[in-house]
C-alpha cells in the first residue's frame, strides 16, 4: 500500500460530446447552475456551446 498516491490527479471524466475519457485535470470544465460538464478539448466545448446557446 502506498498512501502517498494522489487519486484525484488521475481521476477520469467523460467528455460531454464524444464521451472520450480524459483526466479531470486536463478537461475543459463548464459549470452549469447545479452540475458540471467536462470536455476533452475546445473543439467539443465549442460544439456544445453551439448546441446550447443562451437565449
Ligand atoms: Zn470530446
Image: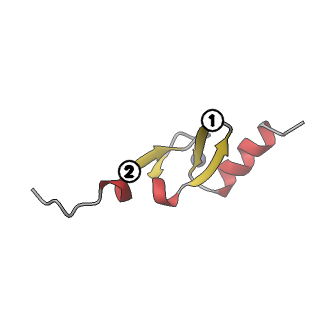
Marks 2/1: CA–CA distance: 21 Å
Residue at the outermost right position: 55
- Taking the spot 83% from the left edge, 40% from the top edge, the residue there is 53
Name the residue carrying label 2: 11
**Which mark lies nearer to you, 2 or 1?**
1
Q: Which mark is residue 34?
A: 1
Residue sitting at 68 percent across and 54 percent down? 43
| Foreground residue among 43 and 30 | 30
CB of residue at label 1: within 8 Å of ligand 1?
no
Q: Secondary structure at mark 2?
A: loop
- Toward which corner of the image does residue 49 lie, by quadrant? top right
Q: Earlier in the sequence, mark 2 or mark 1?
A: 2
Q: Which dot marks residue 19?
A: none
The image shows residue 42, relative to residue 15, as above or below, that is: below
Q: Residue at x 13, y 60 (%)?
A: 2
Residue drawn at point x = 23 percent, y = 61 percent: 5
Circle 1 residues within 10 Å: few <14, some 14–19, many ≥20: few
The reply, left or right, for residue 3 in relation to residue 28 is left
Determine the secondary structure under disc 1: loop
Crowdedness near tag 2: few (<14), some (14–19) or many (≥20) residues, C-alpha within 10 Å: few
Q: Quadrant of residue 50?
A: top right
Q: Tell me where residue 40 appears, x and y as whole percent.
A: 56, 52
Is 25 left, or right, of 38 in this rendering? Answer: left
Quarter residue 23 falls in: bottom left
Residue 15 or 6: which is nearer the viewer? 6
Q: Position of residue 16 (x, y in %)?
A: 59, 40
Q: Where is the C terminus found, in terms of image quarters?
A: top right
55 or 22, which lies in front? Answer: 55
Amino acid at each position: 500500500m502506498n498512501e502517498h498516491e494522489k487519486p484525484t490527479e488521475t481521476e477520469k471524466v467523460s467528455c460531454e460530446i464524444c464521451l472520450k475519457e480524459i483526466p479531470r485535470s486536463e478537461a475543459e470544465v463548464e459549470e452549469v447552475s447545479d452540475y458540471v460538464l467536462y470536455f476533452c478539448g475546445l473543439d467539443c466545448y465549442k460544439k456544445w456551446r453551439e448546441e446550447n446557446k443562451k437565449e
